Image (tube, grey):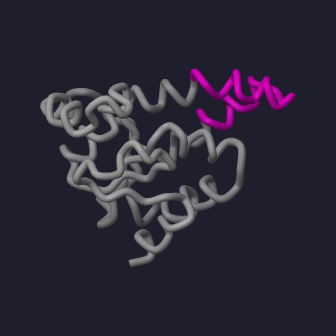
Amino acid sequence: MPSKALIVDANILIRAVFGNKARALLETYAEHASFFVPEPAYLEAEEHLAALMAKRGGDPGKALTLLRAMRSLVDLVGAEVYGAFESEARERLGARDPEDWPVLAAALAIGCPIWTEDTDFFGCGVATWSSGRVEMFLKR
């Protein structure tokens, strides 16, 4: 397993479909880092992507095809990996965004930072990296 690991939030997957930076980072560092995506985060990205693409006048089918193609760059993780951390993750998130608990729980279970644009994770006791800064982490 690569020495670097990150939990990838749904918003990063969506950015990777709409833009080049997040996708380029995933492609560039896939051999040197592990990118873990909790299954609910992947499903969230899949669910919102079609509507977002349609809103922008694009082809939702193409967007979903690109998201699914990026599955080779990430490792989906199920509740068997992070489920034991649900209570702690929910407590740390509080009322901020309780539906994001699998992302935080996965970070706690695997022991790595979260790559996100979501400020709800700030102050939860786990390092977070935004797309503008994550390459500093990946290059170390």
Residue positioned 19% across, 29% down in the render: 86
Tell me if 125 is positioned left or right of 120 in this view.
left
* Residue 13 appears left or right of 112: right
Q: Nearer the viewer, residue 133 or 81?
A: 133
- State the residue at coordinates (59%, 33%): 68
- Residue 88 rendering spot, x and y as whole percentages: 15, 35
Q: Is residue 107 magenta?
A: no
Quadrant in the rendering for residue 63? top right
Q: Residue furthest right?
A: 57
Residue at figure coordinates x 63%, y 47% from the top left: 16
Magenta stretch: includes residue 52: yes
Can you give x and y, in whole percent of width and height, for residue 38 in the image? 36, 34
In which quadrant is the C terminus drawn?
bottom left
- Residue 55 x/y as whole percent: 79, 25
Q: Is residue 5 above or below residue 46?
A: below
Residue drawn at x 18%, y 44% is: 109
Front one among 98 and 109 = 98
Q: Which residues are magenta?
A: 47-68
